[in-house]
Image (cartoon, grey):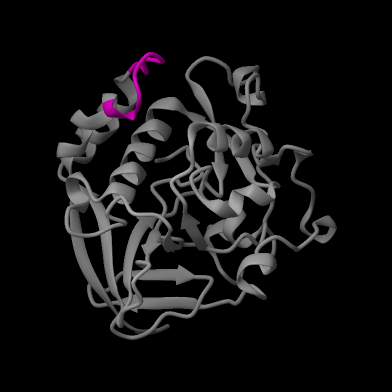
Amino acid sequence: MKSSLIATAALLFVSTTVASPNLLMIFDCVNDGLGGAFCQKWGESFTWDKPSKSTGGKRSTKAGCGSGNRCSKSPYGSGYQCDEYPFKSVQESDAGGQVNRCVKSGYNNAQSQVIRQFYNSQGSFKGTGCGGTAPCAFNIVFANAGNIDWCDSTGSQCKNDGNEYTKAGKVPDPSKRLMRRQESYNGTLGVGGTYMLESGQTIVSARPLSIGDRAVRVKRHNETLYAEYNEMHMPDPEQGLEQYDYMMDNLFLEEDVVIGKV
């Protein structure tokens, strides 16, 4: 999703039932990707807790994405939404301080539908995902990071492009940031590094991965159709995420395996 925090990013799934090897789910990282994972030290390990609508709303408010948020105003406004990381669907967001970005509504909502299907093991995720059962722990990694600092576990610049905020305001320079948050959940944030998949694809992770970890990524049958769906869809505020179900037929899962560290 070119404009989203989760970007078409890489989500690495680990079920609550501990198994070896782990099952990972991958998204592509793009320039508007997850600045919060490395630059804001949120890391990549989260737990979906199936929050109520009220709880989700409170988390969005803590992220600066509540009613009348900055994305509803110039230079954004109509056609944009406030996207937050970590997601309002995970318990770690209770701590507040999430990163938010203003992104195009179509891409953001379509990606939210993918995450919803992941949580409920629906659509392309039948037989994998969380199975609708919370709590469900998962981790996020990134593919196609290239030279994108936000997607690089060793990145140090983390320059704000002007669209990276928290509820407190614009995210400051790295030297002025309080590196906290993730430590309260998962200990000191470790740097896993860059890993090679059997397909030849590389991914970056903030946590160590193991050789043999199975990776699953969502892909599109038709990239042009995917772009058209998201550019042309007019969100209906009276409907939920199910209004994006028709887009899901264009998606499929592709499996891969971690074969080593780069």
Residue at image point 17% right, 58% down: 127
Decide: is 207 above or below 179. below
Q: Residue at x 65, y 33 (%)?
A: 61
Q: In the rendering, at what x and y percent does residue 190 appear?
A: 60, 77
Residue 47 in view in this figure: yes
In the image, 92: left or right of 96?
left
In terms of secondary structure, what is the magenta stretch mainly?
Answer: loop
Relative placement, left or right, of 109 versus 72 is left
Q: Is residue 134 left or right of residue 223?
A: right
Residue 55: quarter of image: top right
Q: Is residue 162 visible?
A: no
The range drawn in magenta is 234-242
Specify whether 171 is left or right of 65. Answer: right
- Which is more toward the observer, 171 or 228? 171
Say whether residue 239 is magenta. Answer: yes
Q: Nearer the viewer, residue 80 or 152?
A: 80
* Residue shown at the point (65%, 17%) measured from the top left: 73
**Residue 166: x and y, percent?**
70, 41
Q: Quadrant of residue 240?
A: top left
- Please give the name of the residue rendered at 23% of the width and 60% of the height, measured from the top-left corner: 128
| The C terminus: image quadrant | bottom left
Q: Quadrant of the N terminus?
A: top left
Decide whether residue 261 is among the magenta residues: no
Residue 132 % position (x, y): 30, 50
- Residue 46: image location, x then y, percent: 51, 60
Q: How many marks?
A: 0
Q: Is residue 8 shown above or below 112?
A: below
Q: Quadrant of residue 27?
A: bottom left
